[in-house]
């Protein structure tokens, strides 16, 4: 198309295996005329493809930005302005990179990490046995802790150097050094101290975080390194919570409640916080930035090309971080929930409402957040944790109503009639759940229910941590600070 002697053109980007080229096509010329150039095809795909230029669609296929095939007769005016089009050589050989066969692959039996799991259980049993008894001499406890710490370092080094690339599930072998380090850190604290339990848990969590960081440094596998780093950060966060509650003279139940309230927030924030890309990946700072943010600040380099291997590495690392973080948070919710309710709630309405809201918000958040993922692991680990929290909440209520020693004061007034009504309510809820599950499993969906679930999920995530602070009686702490 000519307007006043000027030929109008459509600007596109053509990319292939070797390079990407910026093109300006006349609006009336078909795409096949441009791809008939042997030099262009050779630049994009390589010398072996240059001799067969123009063989469309018998050998070459052009894909549009959405991945659909583009007809070779398509005129330039029908192409997307600035679109990224991919030239694919259908006759290119597909070869897999050769790699050496490892010892694990050469074995006839699959390694499920049973020896590491057994060692982890042994470490926890050692911790329970030593913590439940008082040794005659304090040095015995210290000696056991030193032996456990040495075992944690040795097993972490041995496992990290020999870990294969089987994915995030291979990280289950790290349970042994993590459990040993937790036991070592917990046993370092004398049992005669006033707040020995909280200090032991905080020290154990920090020791396990150090071991996870050590695994991240020693392992040669990218996915395990990324997953272990995420585990270390989360363990440090939980250890910091237990240390903070120790400073403000709160009990172990309050620390467990705050950690439980953090779980929905962390599960929600994980997908958006674990993708590590350079600063220039989305914005060309050199082009758009008018002034630097610091005097000696350097302008981030723009990402001029995207390679398949680099994208695959980023996706694999992010997926490993997400899977490891989700599993750890699910286990943390199931572990902290029983300890969070192990104290009388008192008569304070703020503490009472905070405890109930904490359990309700945690269950709702862990049930609704997995709707946004398609991975089975990421779907069912939070849901299993929600079931554990729900069972703990129901057990805490019903045990007090039956035995007369309720954690919540008003539960003891329910009696037999109240328990019957509660059982009837649970039965109706179960029937509704069965009625809804069947059509949903067959693909039925509702936009209205989905939006309602999004609202409930957002409220549950936002209110879980404030409810945990109310349950920990943060108002009394604030009153004391204001009075001082």
Image: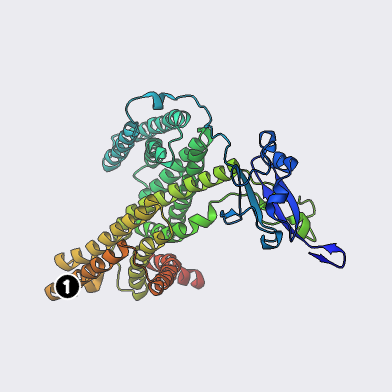
Q: Nearer the viewer, residue 373 or 206?
A: 373
Left or right of 417, for residue 166 = right
Q: Which residue is mark 1?
A: 424
* Residue 454 position within the rendered picture, expressed as x and y whole percent measured from the top left: 43, 69
* Residue 191 position within the rendered picture, expressed as x and y whole percent measured from the top left: 34, 44
Q: Can the viewer see residue 476 in this picture?
A: no
Q: Can the viewer see residue 71 in this picture?
A: yes
For the N terminus, the image quarter is bottom right
Left or right of 149, for residue 91 = right
* Residue 316 position within the rendered picture, expressed as x and y whole percent measured from the top left: 51, 44
Residue furthest right as drawn: 5
The tally of labels here is 1
Q: Quadrant of residue 11?
A: bottom right
Q: Secondary structure at mark 1?
A: helix
- Which residue is at 40% across, 68% downward? 467
Q: Nearer the viewer, residue 444 or 129?
A: 444
**Eyeballing the image, is 104 above or below 117?**
above
**Eyeballing the image, is 366 above or below 22?**
below
Could you classify mark 1 by the number of other residues whose Cα lies within 10 Å: few (under 14), some (14-19), or many (20 or more)?
A: few
- Which residue is at 60% across, 54% downward? 70
């Amino acid at each position: 198309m000519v307007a006043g002697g000027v030929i109008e053109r459509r600007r596109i980007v053509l990319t292939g295996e070797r390079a990407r080229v910026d093109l300006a096509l006349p609006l009336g010329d078909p795409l096949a005329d441009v791809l008939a150039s042997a030099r262009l095809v050779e630049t994009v795909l390589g010398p072996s493809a240059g001799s067969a230029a123009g063989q469309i669609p018998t050998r070459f296929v052009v894909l549009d930005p959405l991945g659909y095939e583009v007809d070779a007769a398509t005129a330039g005016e029908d192409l997307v302005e600035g679109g990224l089009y991919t030239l694919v050589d259908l006759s290119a050989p597909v070869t897999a990179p050769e790699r050496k066969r490892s010892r694990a692959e050469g074995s006839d039996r699959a390694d499920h990490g049973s020896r590491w799991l057994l060692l982890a259980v042994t470490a926890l049993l050692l911790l329970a046995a030593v913590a439940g008894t008082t040794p005659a001499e304090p040095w015995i406890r210290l000696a056991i802790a030193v032996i456990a710490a040495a075992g944690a370092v040795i097993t972490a080094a041995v496992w990290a150097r020999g870990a294969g690339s089987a994915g995030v599930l291979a990280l289950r072998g790290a349970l042994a050094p993590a459990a040993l380090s937790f036991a070592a850190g917990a046993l370092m604290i004398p049992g005669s101290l006033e707040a020995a339990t909280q200090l032991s848990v905080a020290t154990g969590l920090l020791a396990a975080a150090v071991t996870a960081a050590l695994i991240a440094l020693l392992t040669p596998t990218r996915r395990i390194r990324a997953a272990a780093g995420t585990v270390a950060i989360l363990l440090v966060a939980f250890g910091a919570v237990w240390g903070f509650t120790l400073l403000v003279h709160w009990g172990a139940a309050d620390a467990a409640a705050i950690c439980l309230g953090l779980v929905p927030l962390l599960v929600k924030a994980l997908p958006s916080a674990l993708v590590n890309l350079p600063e220039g990946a989305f914005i060309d700072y050199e082009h758009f930035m008018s002034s630097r943010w610091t005097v000696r600040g350097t302008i981030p380099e723009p990402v001029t090309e995207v390679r398949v291997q680099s994208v695959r590495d980023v996706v694999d690392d992010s997926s490993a971080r997400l899977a490891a973080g989700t599993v750890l948070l699910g286990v943390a919710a199931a572990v902290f929930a029983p300890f969070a309710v192990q104290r009388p709630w008192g008569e304070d309405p703020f503490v009472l409402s905070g405890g109930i809201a904490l359990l309700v918000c945690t269950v709702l958040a862990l049930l609704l957040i997995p709707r946004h993922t398609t991975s089975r692991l990421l779907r069912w680990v939070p849901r299993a944790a929600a079931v554990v929290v729900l069972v703990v909440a129901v057990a805490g209520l019903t045990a007090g109503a039956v035995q007369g020693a309720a954690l919540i004061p008003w539960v003891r007034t329910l009696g037999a009639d109240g328990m019957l009504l509660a059982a009837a309510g649970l039965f109706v809820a179960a029937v509704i759940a069965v009625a809804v599950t069947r059509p949903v499993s067959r693909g039925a969906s509702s936009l209205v229910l989905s939006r309602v679930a999004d609202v409930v999920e957002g409220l549950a995530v936002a209110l879980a941590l404030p409810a945990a602070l109310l349950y920990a009686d943060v108002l009394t702490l604030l009153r004391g600070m204001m009075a001082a």
